[in-house]
Amino acid sequence: MTENEEKIFITRPLLPNLDAFGEHIKDIWDSKWLTNHGPKHNELEDKLKETLKVENLSLFNNGTTALLTALRALDLPEGSEVITTPFTFAATPHCISWNGQKIVFCDIEPDTMCIDADKIERLITPNTSAILGVHVYGFPCDVYKIDQIAKKHGLKVIYDAAHAFSTEIDGKGIGSFGDISMFSFHATKLYNTIEGGCLTYNDEKLKARVYNLRNFGIISEEEVAEIGINGKMNELQAAVGLLNLDLYKQEQEKRAVVRTKYMDEISKIDGIKIPLMPAKASNSYQYFPIVIEKEYPLTRNELYERFKEQNILTRKYFYPACSDYEPYKKLKSSNAKNLPVTNEIKEKVLCLPFYGDLTEENINKIIRILKG
Ligand code: T4K
């Protein structure tokens, strides 16, 4: 066994059949068309639109370039304020800053751990241009309340749906809410294209703009209309994406079984809370977070170390919070008194290994450690 084989990771990527991938590679080699909106890219764009139940979809080479492009496509004024959550991966605030907007962190709601819609309005100033919510762990933000606030104040709404592939709210694709949503198809995501991502949006007029921004701002051989980026997904990524589209539901079913096994046993343990999906939303099965309360005999950090001693690599997503990061910690909105829930949750949350091929033996080992 190699060192890696002995470890239990938080996730393992969904991998298509190698021969099937070989057939795609042969097509790509034969056509000599490797990237720049090739046939597999275009086929995947069409298919994903149906899967995610959205009107418009543009593929990207990763979720971060997609989110950067989303902010640019909405023409948020430079120096304007974007209200967002500190309880997310670094990419979310980095995209706002990289794009020249100012971050205003809003505290999170304790059950879903998403931005607390009831605390957004008090942070709005004449300089606010947008709200950027994150459907963290696939739990949905309060999209209806956020929509009301945005309409009332004339703000744009962007969602980071990196963790929410195929989640639906009241039967609608989660990517159909707000002005633009971003999905990540990174290797660690339920559905992956190795690296990759997409934007989804209702306004068809954004399509051409997103297309140009994704391709350096080029609009014709002799015309570059604006400052764009290289956000294009290549044909190899798209081939993995096409094959994984046939597999992700089966992976979700396998994860549902793992989840049930975890729930049956962990729900009996005093001091461990399992955050639940609101009834109106379907589960993407991206992560399995637990919250370690005071009644539990170990702190979250002690539990993390205990797992590590047994080669089980749980993750403290998202500790530290983004408001603790060097570039953001001095912001007024990062002050601890403004973020009591974030600062409490970041010390208590732990994501357990969660993927379809997690063996019964390993699930039992994890549960045994939790039971102490
Ligand atoms: N917004 C949110 C809310 C996000 O969570 C993310 C990304 C983004 C935006 C940006 O989207 P992208 O630009 O990435 O598309 C991972 C991922 O790299 C990152 O995509 C993800 N969020 C974040 C939550 O997790 P790390 O640093 O934790 O990954 P790493 O390398 O430690 O991998 C975790 C475990 O996964 C490994 O211990 C083993 C397993 N693994 C990983 C890789 C890469 C594999 O088995 N095979 C692999 O190839 O960031």
Image (tube, rainbow, N blue to C red):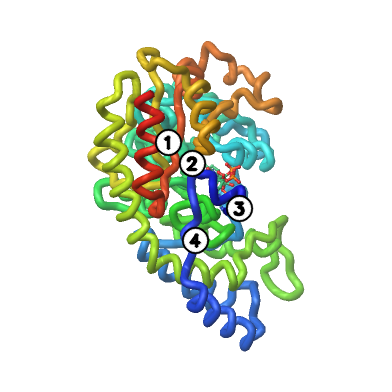
Decide: marks 4, 3 in contact (CB < 8 A)?
A: no
Tell me the residue at 56%/37% (across/down). 89
Decide: marks 1, 2 in contact (CB < 8 A)?
A: yes
Marked residue nearer the N-terminal end (4 or 3): 3
How far across and how far down the image is residue 177, in percent? 38, 47
Tell me the residue at 69%/57% (across/down). 229
How far across and how far down the image is residue 194, in percent? 57, 60
Label 3 packing within 10 angstroms: few (<14), some (14-19), many (20+): few
* SS at badge 2: strand
Disc 2 to disc 3, C-alpha distance: 49 Å
Residue located beneath label 4 in the image:
205
Farthest residue to the top: give it. Answer: 337
Disc 1 to disc 3, C-alpha distance: 52 Å
Marked residue nearer the N-terminal end (2 or 4): 2
Decide: marks 1, 3 in contact (CB < 8 A)?
A: no
Decide: marks 2, 3 in contact (CB < 8 A)?
A: no
Residue located beneath label 1 in the image:
150
* SS at badge 4: loop
Residue located beneath label 2 in the image:
156
Q: Nearer the viewer, mark 2 or mark 3?
A: 3
Q: Report the amino acid beneath label 4.
A: Lys
Q: Report the amino acid beneath label 3.
A: Thr
How far across and how far down the image is residue 32, in percent? 66, 84
**Mark 1 vs ligand 1: CB under 8 Å?**
no
Residue 2's disc is 3
Compared to residue 341, the image places residue 168 above or below, namely: below
* SS at badge 3: loop
Q: For residue 246, what is the image quadrant?
A: bottom left
Disc 2 to disc 4, C-alpha distance: 15 Å
Tell me the residue at 25%/47% (across/down). 170
Q: Report the amino acid beneath label 1.
A: Ala
